[in-house]
Amino acid sequence: MNATQNLKQDHITLRRVRNIAKRCSEKLYANEYIPFEDLQIISVVIEEFVDRFHHGKEEQAYFPETKEKDSFSEDIRKFLIEHELGRRIARMLLRNLKAWRDSNEKGSLEPLARFLKSYSVFLNDHTGKEDKFFDLIEGKNSLSEHENESLLRHFEVCQNQIGGIARVEQMMKLIEYLEEREWMQ
């Protein structure tokens, strides 16, 4: 698997996270019960897997490597802006999750539903755009075999920064756990 295919494979997992966030949002809007722990797990998966791991691979390695190739710098600039948008949505979700947890009155869950929905829309739109970009990279053979090997080594560094293969496997198990929850059915 080359570096581009590696990132496209991550996008399959990101779409699973999108589906979880979307379903959770729908349930919250319908005033259906979602365990607080599940909401926390969603927030952790977004922060660690989506942002620190996947976006980290793109921002620290892939985008710098492809920025000057085939006039991709404008596309990459837009993706970086979108990553920041995703981070802001995730921070607002976490802030509202903590405020709800700490509230004595346990008010409306609408802000959590809104930010989960916003995040699911972000993931859907963003991964679609990046997949088209990745298809262009592959179609133009923009990365040499040496560059791909170098990127894959850097992806391992990114993986180690979040706790190694064991932590990535934990994230995958958390996603599976959420997908199997009764509220996801």
Image (cartoon, rainbow, N blue to C red):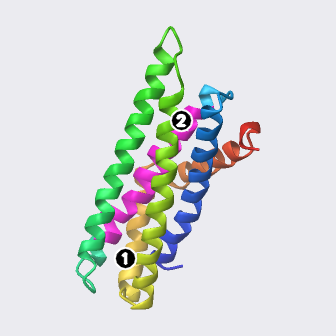
Say which of marks 2 and 1 sits in front: 2
SS under mark 2: helix
Say which quadrant the N terminus sits in. bottom right
Residue 94 appears left or right of 176: left
Query: How far apart are the alpha carbons under marks 2 and 1?
Result: 40 Å
Which of the two residues, 120 or 46, is positioned nearer the viewer here?
Answer: 120
Please name the amino acid that badge 2 sits on: Ala
Q: Which residue is drawn at 57% across and 51% down?
A: 17
- Residue 178 percent coordinates (x, y): 67, 43
* Overall secondary structure of the magenta section: helix
Specify the farthest residue to the top.
104
Q: Is residue 172 magenta?
A: no
Q: Which mark is residue 150?
A: 1
Foreground of the two, 154 or 104: 104
Q: Is residue 49 above or below residue 126?
A: above
Residue 104 visible in the snapshot: yes
Q: Residue drawn 35% across and 87% down?
A: 142
